[in-house]
Amino acid sequence: FSLYQTPSPKKAKGNFIVRLFGSLHPASWFKKKASETETEYKRGLRTYTRMKTLYSSILLCEAREGITVKSLEELVKKKYVRPETLKDGWGNDIIYVEQYLRLIAPGSDGEPDTDDDFVLGSDGHFIKLPEDFVMQTLEVESHPPHP
């Protein structure tokens, strides 16, 4: 037994890293990051549901009116959707490619043809979804909110 017993190097290193990380990233940082992630997920979910609504509205309008919808603005004029439905969760215009009955939302960066795009195909299924949205959806589904 020694009065000068030194702590194990592993434990000392771990404590140092925890203290250093804690000083660099206070608890409020983690809460802010979780809040930002939740907000981004809600924007993605809003985009997802608006695109599904637009797709259904295009089909409904074409069936009822006997026309081919050329632009999403037609749906607003004919009162099938409200103007805000034409925007993704980040406020960007959802793009309609009439030739292919395809909807494209440019996502958080506002640029089409990037990794964060939402693309809904002519069969009503998503051809492309941002990877982070898919992962967040899986996380939400595996941990449903408690009542």
Image: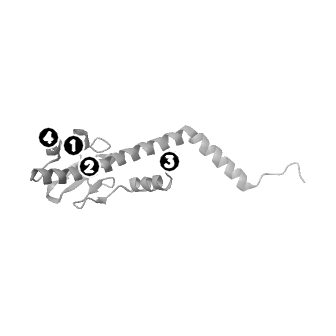
Count residues near mark 1 (Cα–Cα under 10 Å), then give few for <14, some for 14-19, many for 20+.
some
- Mark 3–mark 2 distance (CA, rounded to whole Å): 25 Å
Q: Earlier in the sequence, mark 2 or mark 4?
A: 2
Count residues near mark 4 (Cα–Cα under 10 Å), then give few for <14, some for 14-19, many for 20+.
few
Q: Earlier in the sequence, mark 1 or mark 2?
A: 2
Helix or strand or loop: what does disc 2 sit on?
Answer: helix
Count residues near mark 3 (Cα–Cα under 10 Å), then give few for <14, some for 14-19, many for 20+.
few
Residue at 49% over, 56% down: 142
Helix or strand or loop: what does disc 3 sit on?
Answer: loop
Residue at 46% over, 52% down: 140
Marker disc for residue 38: none
For label 3, the residue is 145
Q: Is residue 129 visible?
A: yes
For label 4, the residue is 77
Task: Name the amino acid, label 2.
Answer: Thr
Q: Position of residue 5 (x, y in %)?
A: 84, 51
Q: Earlier in the sequence, mark 4 or mark 3?
A: 4
Marker disc for residue 81: 1
For label 2, the residue is 53
